[in-house]
Image: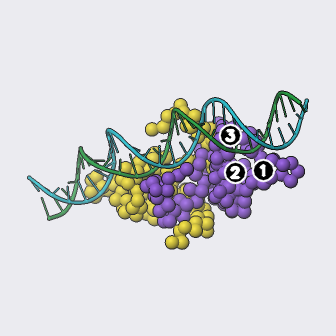
Chain colours: A yellow, B purple, C cyan, D green
Amino acid sequence: MRKTTSTNYINATKLHGLCDAAYTLSQLSGRWKLTLLVKLGEGSKRFSELKGEVPAITERILALQLKELEKSGLISKQESTLKKKQYSYELSPLGKSMDQVIQSLSAWGKINNLQAEL
Amino acid sequence: MRKTTSTNYINATKLHGLCDAAYTLSQLSGRWKLTLLVKLGEGSKRFSELKGEVPAITERILALQLKELEKSGLISKQESTLKKKQYSYELSPLGKSMDQVIQSLSAWGKINNLQAEL
DNA sequence: TAATGAACTTACAAAATTGTAAGCGATTAG
DNA sequence: CTAATCGCTTACAATTTTGTAAGTTCATTA
């Protein structure tokens, strides 16, 4: 939980007021969020599928990041109509509207991320 | 300084290997970096000008973020030809190549950052 | 019905980032 | 010559993020 009285928190808020780009970035901040959005861009997936596609993430962090993405409205969680207690995650319309942003980020990375040549 | 043996560090590296977008994001991570790039997109500026335009940042953090941006090659630091010990910062070609990314981030924020309506 | 697996949660610890306060050397203004 | 300003740096503390390890609940499988 964040302390809403800390300078840190207050600064973040101020920043979002004066820089739209920084606001967008804040919605994506968290080690794995962007990658999760990319994966969910391929279609809806279950918790364990995501865990499988991003092996290094721990269950705790995966749950945490999914919850935050849900809270910011970028993804939604659905319960299967067939089986109870079986969920899947998918991009919400807001999440889909990030498409252009994600494309740009990927494109720049593709050109400049030399490490990815491995 | 980052500990290159920590799981945290190793995970970041792995992630950049499997997601270009995440790599790009990592170049922008740091509370104020993106906003500094936006400001420098308007033209080259001096340390104190940047401090003036982003009041909440402290000198320590400003120096830190500028140094990191320089190290990742997104900006460059020039000494004035007229006066010694007077520097200015500007976007490097690599920094300018971020233009499309920054545009997307700004555009999405403009639409979705309700807080900016203040 | 006991065992298994999915999707988490909890308590804790380590690491990373950000902020506070003060100071310092060079240069410039007075 | 002296004081003020610029562009930092240092030592330290608070905050935030990320990871470890273990446990829980419900539902399906054997």
- Is A10 on the left-hand or right-hand side of B66? left
Residue position marked by numbered label 1 in the rendering: B88
Q: Secondary structure at mark 2?
A: helix
Q: Amino acid at mark 2?
A: Val
Residue placed most toward the observer, A42 or A19 = A19
Q: Nearer the viewer, residue A80 or B11?
A: B11
Label 1 environment density (alpha carbons within 10 Å; few <14, some 14–19, many ≥20)? some
Q: Which mark is residue B38?
A: 2
Q: Chain of mark 2?
A: B
Look at label 1 and name its amino acid: Ser
Q: Residue furthest bottom?
A: A117
Report, in whole angstroms, how far the alpha carbon at label 3 lies from the one at label 1.
15 Å
Subunit bearing disc 3: B
Tell me, yes or no, if residue A80 can be seen here.
Answer: yes
> Residue D12, image x and y in percent?
55, 34
N-term-proximal mark, 1 vs 2: 2
Do the residues at discs 1 and 2 belong to one chain?
A: yes
Q: What subunit carries mark 1?
A: B
Q: Position of residue C12 (x, y in %)?
A: 35, 40
Closer mark to the observer between disc 2 and disc 3: 3
Q: Quick one: label 3, few (<14), some, or many (20+) residues within 10 Å?
A: some
- On screen, residue B38 versus residue A104, left or right, reads right
* Residue at 50% in and 53% down: B3
